[in-house]
Amino acid sequence: MLQGKTIVLGVSGGIAAYKAVELVRLFTKAGATVQVIMTKAATEFVGPLTFQTLSGNPVHQQLFNLIEEQEIGHISLAERADLFVIAPATANVIGKIASGIADDLLTTAVMATRAPVLIVPAMNVNMFQNPLYKANEERLRNLGYRFVAPVTGMLACGWQGEGKMQDPAVILEEAVALLAPDDLAGETVLVTAGPTREEIDPVRFISNHSSGKMGYAIARAAWRRGARVILVSGPTCLPDPWGPETVRVSTAAQMLEAVQARLKESSIVIKAAAVADYRPKERSEAKVKKHAGQMTLEMERNPDILAEVGRQKDGRLVIGFAAETEDLLANARRKLQEKNLDLIVANDVGQPGAGFDVETNIVRLLFPDGRVEEPGIMPKEELADLILDRIVALRATPV
Ligand code: CTP
């Protein structure tokens, strides 16, 4: 997600500095080169060696350092940044930046950078609510600096309130979004994901192996690329992603209702959910007891949500998935036509490395003009972006 990017991470002096350690780990894991600048106060909370070990780079602390200055002055540090993140950012550092003060390495490098700057405040609730702080934040926001708002909780100073530094995983999402193209800005993308559950009685249900990973990856990628995203999800073990609005449902009937309720405002619909085609004709109120001999369960058809969406297109792009175990292309082509789709993503779920509950997928992309694309095995995160690339191209093609 951050391959080839350089992130300069400024750490200022607050107790949340310990959480910045995790942030370095997440940034490097995502492929970024991380250069850490610590203020003097930050070194009182966490030792520079921790950041140095995790980033694999020396930690920068001094504005005038004769040894460092030759090869990596504050200007070159500022210039090399694709993104500048300050986490935690104290009221003091934010005040200095807002006032144009550059009296240490961090504030000087921030002033010198042309990269986007993401500020992650962390402070006591009273400081956060102080009008001086609010004015500084507003001034910086108006100048194009981006903020990740703090959360409410128990603060290290003993107070309860707003001021806790946001979770490192969320900061990572915001950082990735800042570096991603904004080519879905203005679109509202409705994504469905996961399985549905069709209840037999209060303790049993019929479902499938879908984990929701593919749909969630698409929802996250679309949000990073600037879209407003509504994720309608069947029951999964995945947490609500940061960014998209998540609507949780259980049955196919509930999924249809949720999709229909949000269809009007959506300009792109991507149906990655594995919807159960049938549900038990009757759901027993009491737990079904066993008795001698066999049991027969009568099933009735669920609505086909995608076909329904395809019938009322109204200028929106509609993308479906096809889970197949045989005759992949023929079945996918038929679904593409019958459901009136702009693109279908077909996967052979019987193949190792494809389909349900794995990190990768192997798909073919089929278009209404007969084109078939075969991108080969790839991580679901990467495939999500490839699918969105094709959707952006479809959007750009006049009908
Ligand atoms: N789909 C849907 N509602 C259903 C069944 C499927 O919206 N009741 C959508 C899925 O989300 C997917 C596409 O239709 O985008 C194809 O789903 P798939 O299970 O591959 O095919 P089906 O249409 O159900 O056909 P079959 O089960 O016969 O393969």
Image: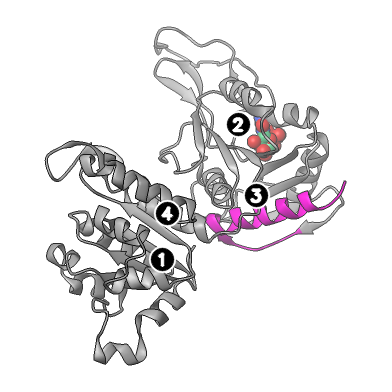
The answer to whether the residue bearing label 3 lies less than 8 angstroms from the nearest atom of ligand 1 is no
Could you tell me if the residues under marks 1 and 3 are in contact, i.e. CB atoms within 8 Å?
no
Mark 4 or mark 1: whose residue is earlier in sequence = 1
**Residue 84's disc number:** 1
Rendered position, 158 above or below 48:
above
**Residue 275's disc number:** 2
Distance, label 3 to label 2, CA atoms, is 26 Å
Question: Where does the image place residue 18, in percent across and percent down from the top left?
Answer: 20, 58
Mark 4 or mark 3: whose residue is earlier in sequence = 4
Report which residue position mark 4 lands on: 140
- Of badges 4 and 2, the one in the foreground is 4
Question: Where does the image place residue 244, in percent across and percent down from the top left?
Answer: 51, 40
Q: Secondary structure at mark 2?
A: loop
Report which residue position mark 3 lands on: 184
Q: Secondary structure at mark 4?
A: helix
Distance, label 4 to label 3, CA atoms, is 26 Å
